[in-house]
Amino acid sequence: MYELIIIGAGPCGIAAAIEAERRGVSYLMLEHGSLAMSLTKYPIYMTFASSPENLELGGHPFPTGGEKPTRLEAIRYFRRVAEVEQVKVHQYEKVTGVEKGAHFTVKTQKRDGTTGAYETANIALAIGYFDHPNMLGIPGEENPERCTHFYTEPSPYYGMNVAVIGGKNSAVEAALQLYRAGVKVSLVYRRAELPASVKPWVRPDIENRIKTGAIAAYFSTNIRSINPTTITLEQDGRTFELENDFVFALTGYSPDQSVLRGLGVEIDAATGKPRHDEATMETNVPGLFLVGVIAAGYDANKIFIENGRFHGKAVVDTILARR
Ligand SMILES: Cc1cc2nc3c(=O)[nH]c(=O)nc-3n(C[C@H](O)[C@H](O)[C@H](O)COP(=O)(O)OP(=O)(O)OC[C@H]3O[C@@H](n4cnc5c(N)ncnc54)[C@H](O)[C@@H]3O)c2cc1C
């Protein structure tokens, strides 16, 4: 019987584990991939917008080569901090369900095909949102030879016709990187213009590439299907085909709220925000806490590593106060 099970070993889950470890709360962290798994799916050559101090966990200094950390530096840092703090984590053990009786039973699936079950008084759900891309719901989307929802690097697409679907930062940054790697890029966005959230230092770059025609932009345009050698687009009620080799559907990600709903957490229909006390991070289900971006609902820009790394402290404070 644990005092706390942390589900998910992203940066915010690791920060929660450090709190539990240092303050003598009996805990275990379960991760369905490897430590800081979500970052391994980010663009390979990305640099964080945050300064390294704002990503630090447990007060461990985060020295970086440049002003801002690269993805690789961050992965190494989070891994090293977890190692030094000796956080207790089972990697490659996916949580498949949680039941609530007098306490919680957390059910898992391991890599070797066996299953696990853990009893715990409290749960910190730190599963992020990056595993669940927003699907377009169109024919051809499921074909991995033609379409992906994760952009990592441009080189495999040199000289090819690539459509990037979406207009927010991840889509715009991917479009620019692909263009600079010699890819013929079309940016397809359903709205009339790029959103205000595009990073101010990226906006002039993309706008100029569109103005000069280096990147072909299709605004107010929806993609209707991904065909063997083309995509079908619809603009102002008119459909047309565009030659295409690969599609990056970078239309955002949504949290998997099935565990929350299954346990009776109230979720705001408009914002997707699970009901919780922001001081303790406890949901309306006693003993079930939120850690990291899962607390944000549908707007993943409200919680990130910078602020989500402090949620674990609130959880551990609450558990200790109730002992
Ligand atoms: C391109 C990009 C750039 C970004 N730049 C910044 C930045 O500059 N600064 C900043 O603060 N934030 C930034 N962010 C956001 C930040 O990375 C996320 O907010 C952060 O990773 C959230 O951490 P988390 O621990 O809540 O979730 P995650 O990092 O998503 O971790 C969740 C973990 O839970 C695991 N998991 C999921 N389901 C299960 C299950 N059923 N069982 C077991 N494990 C499970 C996943 O494998 C994953 O490892 C950026 C994001 C992106 C995509």
Image: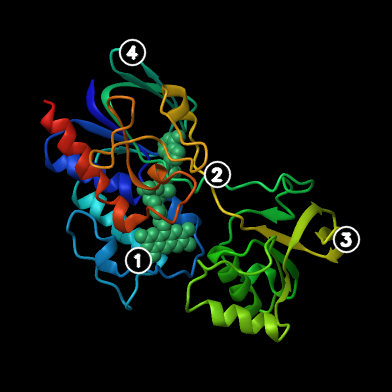
Name the amino acid type tagged 2.
Answer: His
Instruction: Give whichever of discs 1 and 2 has the lower sequence position.
Output: 1
Residue position for label 1: 73
- In the depicted structure, whether residue 266 falls above or below residue 243: above
Name the amino acid type tagged 1.
Answer: Glu
- Disc number at residue 57? none
**Residue pictured at 81% horizontal, 59% vertical:** 233
Q: Are marks 4 and 1 in contact (CB under 8 Å)?
A: no
Residue position for label 4: 101
Residue position for label 2: 132
Which of the image's four quarters has the C terminus?
top left
Residue position for label 3: 238
Q: Position of residue 270 (x, y in %)?
A: 52, 41
Outermost residue toward the top in this view: 102
Q: Position of residue 87 (x, y in %)?
A: 23, 43
* Secondary element at image label 2: loop
Give whichever of 263, 274 is nearer the camera: 274
Q: Where is residue 167 in the image (x, y as percent from the top left)?
A: 62, 65
Instruction: Give whichever of discs 4 and 1 has the lower sequence position.
Output: 1
For the residues labelled 4 and 1, the Cα–Cα distance comes to: 42 Å
